[in-house]
Image: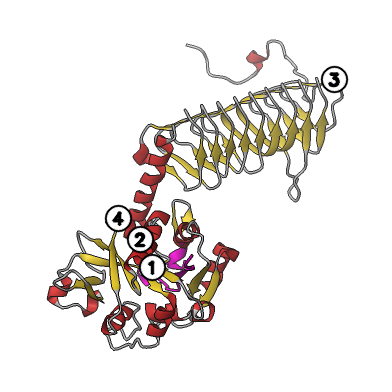
Amino acid sequence: MTAKYTIILAAGQGTRMKSKLTKVLHPVCGRPMVDHVLTQAEQLQPDKIVTVIGHGADQVKTVLGKRTDYARQAVQKGSGDAVLQAEAQLGDKTGMTMVVSGDTPLLTAKTFEQLFEYHREKGAKATVLTAVAPDPTGYGRIVRNDLGVVEKIVEQKDATREEAAIKEINTGVYCFDNATLFKALHEVGNDNAQGEYYLTDVIGILKAKGEIVAAYKMKNFAESLGVNTRQALAQATTIMQQRINQQHMAAGVTLVDPAATHIDVGVEIGRDTTIEANVTIKGNTTIGEDCTITSGSALTDATIGNDVQITSSTIEASTMHDHSNIGPMSHLRPESDIGEHVHIGNFCEVKKAQLGAYTKMGHLTYVGNATLGKHINIGCGVVFVNYDGLHKHQTSVGDWAFIGSNSNLVAPVKVADHAFIAAGSTITDNINFHDMAIARARQVNKPDYWNKLPHEPEN
């Protein structure tokens, strides 16, 4: 079988993005653009992938890690020079090499495979992936002869008026015979408007030598979108989001308003789950079956079981187990674990805490740095006081405990199983099994005191 290689071009700064962040690291639906490209290329299982880096090299390497080899383009002198930097890793190889830009996040493994197959069928030394653009401005044009054979690729700035009118464009993706590619790159010059070494000039060099140059025209121009501006980034995000949402709906998920539902790539959602409009689901989030997530909810790196109800609430890096519910207007901060059948009502916050099965906290409660057992009732206005100004401290509450409204538990403190805390108490000491704690001033009623106090006369 013929060996396959991939070169990903990710060295450019992307000045039109007007950003401190390297262009290829701008996210599309939760992943950097270059990560999307690498993920699709990996599905073809090439023998080697080389990513050419330059601006933001260290950041790109941090994102992609050991999934790819790297070559460095110290000075950006054009796409041809960028590919040439991979010669040390690939120059002595035989096989087919695909070259793709790291700012084309919508390209798919299926298209890559079709390009390789077309290149193989045609016996070509080079195959260009092309598309027909409604507005070709900014793209290199594919110039064909009267027989439809590719003659050359002309960049926008170097095109004549007739060439600029051509709508078939170069997507920036190529498949080459590997040895032929690197040999031709050494013949590329920089006599052009930009003074750069264009990879596209390889096509003309090969044509002059009588080599076969093919062009595979893809059906969907939108897939070829290259991102060079914030506007294009938004366009790519919209298209990617449509893909993601269509996949979830096809798998049995109800999206009430797909255009207003933002789901990152990689999110998993079970059948018969309903997601209303204006919901954001990010990161490594997994949602089970038969859940309902209402408008205004935001989930990031969350693990949600089956039959969970999330009403206009925020969940970050936390877990909700089967049949639990939360909201409206509540917040699970990182490292919270909510057991089965737990009820969390409105305006509650949980941080780095575990709540056992069937525990209830209806409203206006803060639970932080705590371990709570099963069947606990937490009244309105309860605060787990976990911070002393320097350190966070732990609280534990046993099964079947009752915590009355407007109570404060000052950590570190332990409340045993079946303990009872009277409303309005400030707890600073441990409470034993079956004990009730009352930690509040006694009420004193002063008879007829109304007449001793200043007040407005009644009409």
Looking at the image, tell me whether mark 4 or mark 3 is earlier in sequence order.
4
Determine which residue is flagged by label 4.
222
Q: Amino acid type of disc 3? A: Asp
Q: Which residues are drawn in magenta?
A: 1-26
Instruction: Identify the residue at image location x=53%, y=66%.
Output: 47
- The alpha-carbon separation of the residues under discs 1 and 4 comes to 23 Å
Circle 4 Cα neighbour tier, 10 Å, few/some/many (<14 / 14–19 / ≥20): some
- The alpha-carbon separation of the residues under discs 4 and 2 comes to 16 Å
Tag 1, which secondary structure?
A: loop
Contact (Cβ within 8 Å) of mark 1 with mark 4? no
Looking at the image, tell me whether mark 1 or mark 4 is earlier in sequence order.
1
Circle 2 Cα neighbour tier, 10 Å, few/some/many (<14 / 14–19 / ≥20): some
Q: Horizontal and vertical percent for residue 376?
A: 72, 23
Looking at the image, tell me whether mark 1 or mark 3 is earlier in sequence order.
1
Above or below: residue 448 compared with residue 10: above
Instruction: Identify the residue at image location x=47%, y=11%.
Output: 459
Looking at the image, tell me whether mark 4 or mark 2 is earlier in sequence order.
4
- The alpha-carbon separation of the residues under discs 4 and 3 comes to 68 Å
Left or right of 195, for residue 27: right
Contact (Cβ within 8 Å) of mark 1 with mark 3? no
Left or right of 162, for residue 123: right
Q: In which quarter of the image is residue 62?
A: bottom right
Determine which residue is flagged by label 3.
435
Q: Amino acid type of disc 1? A: Lys
Q: Which of 108 and 303 is in front in this view?
A: 108
Tag 3, which secondary structure?
A: loop
Instruction: Identify the residue at image location x=27%, y=80%.
Output: 207
Determine which residue is flagged by label 2.
230
